[in-house]
Image (cartoon, rainbow, N blue to C red):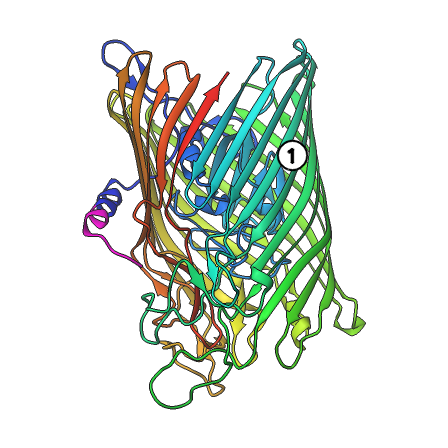
Amino acid sequence: MSSNIGLKTMAVSALALMASASYTATAQENGENSLTLGTITVTAQQRDEDLQDVPISVATLPDGLLDSMFANGEDILALGARVPGLYAESSNGRAAPRFYIRGLGNTDFDLAASQPVSVIMDDVVMENVALKSFPLFDVEQIEISRGPQGTLFGRNTTAGIIKISTARPTHEFGGYANATVGSYGTVNLEGAVGGSLIEDVLAVRVSALGQRREDWIDNTENPGSDDLGEFTELAGRVQLLYTPNDDFSALLNVRTRDLEGTSAIFRANVLTPGSNELNENFDRDRVSFDEGNDNQQGYNGWGSSATLEYNFGPVTLTSITGYESLNGFSGGDIDGGAGPYTFNFAGPFTYPELPFASATQDAIDELTQLTQEVRLASNSDGKLFWQAGVYYFDGAFTVTTKGIGGFPFPPASTLEHENIAWAVYGQTSYQVTDKFKLTGGLRYTSDEKDLTVFANAAQARNVSDEYLSWELSALYDITPDFSVYGRVADGFRGPSIQGRDVAFFADPSVADSETILSFEAGWKATLIDNRMRLNGAVYTYTVDGMQLTAVGGAGNSVQLINADEATATGFEMDVEYLPVENLLLTAGFSYTDTELKDSDLAVGTCAQCSVLDPLNANGFALVDGNPFPNAPETIANFTARYSIPFGDGEFFAFTDWAYQGETNIFLYESTEYQTDGQFEGGLKLGYAQDDGSWEFAVFARNITDEENIKGGIDFNNNTAFVNEPRIIGATLKTQF
């Protein structure tokens, strides 16, 4: 982790602004020298609403920021720390992201792991962790709803949701093409085209993405150079919109992706006991792997959805049918190094390796997911709005885990996971007075999971649960431009089964359902003649039976456990400001204090760590009072766009920065696996035509080439993995 006084000063300045990179405001002249921010429309309550009228803490990301963030071929993990309260990481490369909102997430790296943050793409839930990694392109809007969203979006949303909406077909011909080249042989090609096939009746939109990076990391155990780091990502989407009349519409969405490349790069012995700084063993461009087949990874799959809407006058009936199919694998040298495999029990620390080679591969085969939702919603413009619906989920897939090499030789295990869930729900909003609105909702969910172990029927597991989740909120307009709200929300994450340890001579483990009760109070303000948007919230929540994953210990096992209770308290703010013409500023800040509360909860630790927790009689760490794993105490972000009119266009500069405060990586606390003061920044300089017909820019991502620890493997050799390197490049975009 590097430091830079000037950049840290910039990060502190961003903290002072206390806000979030939200939405690209549409600045326009409104009278003489009067600038205004455009309206942000969100669908956090399953209908189009002004962001300022929604009694939920919601943040959005603009296309402009997305273009900058993903210019270097980044995947969905780039969203981490770009919104207050949102964090992301992965030990599975580009294939299985793990998200955290307000500190609540799941560190489980198993391909069957459930997450409390739901990713919803074009109104279809992406339940499996590999489905959540579908690449982002031709995106219309991304919404992050913070806090439990169980009434309208169901189980496994105890932390919140990330809702991704791609650009829909229109009857106006148009599209765009974007080409980017950068260091390390990075190429990013993206484009879309669409318009009417039958005027005012049938429209189409076709979009595609191609990303590539060359190998740039040398494995010193192999002859030659540059063995790891490459990836090739291909994805496409076709949408058809059928609108035969004003009362009916049908949207068909078919998407596909193919990923090949390198998975996560684990680096052995890069942390010295007693320090969380990368030591002299760390070299971003080199590793020494004797196993793992160069950490190869490959995923391919496709999905489709059909959204039908019928307007029956007083009500609208909506049907959303989704289907997903996926296959893939991810493997690697997990211990992050090469032999000799011996321990050092005496003398000065000499960076020991594991006493055996440690490489594994996990593969998903034949994943299928079928979802169906049908809901009715009122069309009245009166004081009462209501909606009610039913939801069905049917998912199944097999997971094969291989232990490659080592002693004793772990056999491959193949497990089948099946999950069936259904729910009924309803929500009502009532405008009590012109200034006061109440909203309440209920959802009943039934969730059942089955695990079949092909080699041992006795290890089969079945878990199920039923739950009634609810929410109640109130919004009061103090003035037309300033409102306050309060929200109480309850939700649950269904029970989980973890079967990865079957490959390592252990039985599957089970975690009971977790439930959450969240209290939130916030405000929505439009200030300075609509040139500033300032939204904020304070919150506290309690999780009963919090699902956790214990990794490590004497056998380096992976086991699901439940904590009796866990609590969090915090606040977040989002600001967007137009101080003068041609300058747009956004900023964000969040603070979250999390705590595990279970006096008996004990987990294994890494052998070479400086563990800060008390130990029980078995040498396991007692984690009562510890923060949640991968829950940054603070997150801050800042963006600025400034333009200078010239000719028929403008020269512009865009910069964005994200800061991550103190973060404990594992359940136990140790000196080595705590990070603080990490940041990354980007810069984009270019020229754009006023009519948007073309834009040329040069850019740099991770412009200061920060070396930030993003996670670790708690074996006995202080292994870690880090962020992406600095990428410098150029991009050309045209719109028509």
Looking at the image, which residue sits at the far front? 224
345 relative to 715, above or below: below
The one of 506 and 603 positioned closer to us in this rendering: 506
Give the amino acid type for the residue marked by disc 1 in the picture: Ala
Residue in the foreground of this view, choosing between 346 and 53:
346
Residue 1 in view? yes
Q: Residue furthest bottom?
A: 346
- Using the image, determine if residue 167 lies above or below residue 302: above
x, y percent for residue 172: 57, 12
Picture residue at 35% right of the left edge, 56% below the top: 707
Q: Image height check: is 303 above or below 359?
A: above
Query: As displayed, is residue 568 above or below residue 691?
Result: below
In the image shown, does 637 or 527 lie closer to the viewer? 637
Q: Residue at x 65, y 26 (%)?
A: 239
Q: In the rendered view, does 70 fall on the left or right side of 484?
A: right
Does residue 711 show up? Answer: no
Q: Secondary structure at mark 1?
A: strand
Q: Is residue 462 left or right of residue 623?
A: right
The crowd level at tag 1 (other Cα within 10 Å; few <14, some 14-19, many 20+) is some
Q: Which residues are magenta?
A: 1-9
User: Which quadrant: the N terminus?
Assistant: bottom left
- 7 in the magenta segment: yes
Question: Residue 125, position in %: x, y?
Answer: 62, 42
Per the image, is 175 magenta?
Answer: no
Residue at the spot 65% in from the left edge and 20% down from the top edge: 204
Residue bearing the label numbered 1: 388
Q: Position of residue 368 (x, y in %)?
A: 73, 47
Question: Where does the image place residue 107, in percent across and percent down from the top left?
Answer: 51, 61
Q: Nearer the viewer, residue 343 or 426?
A: 343
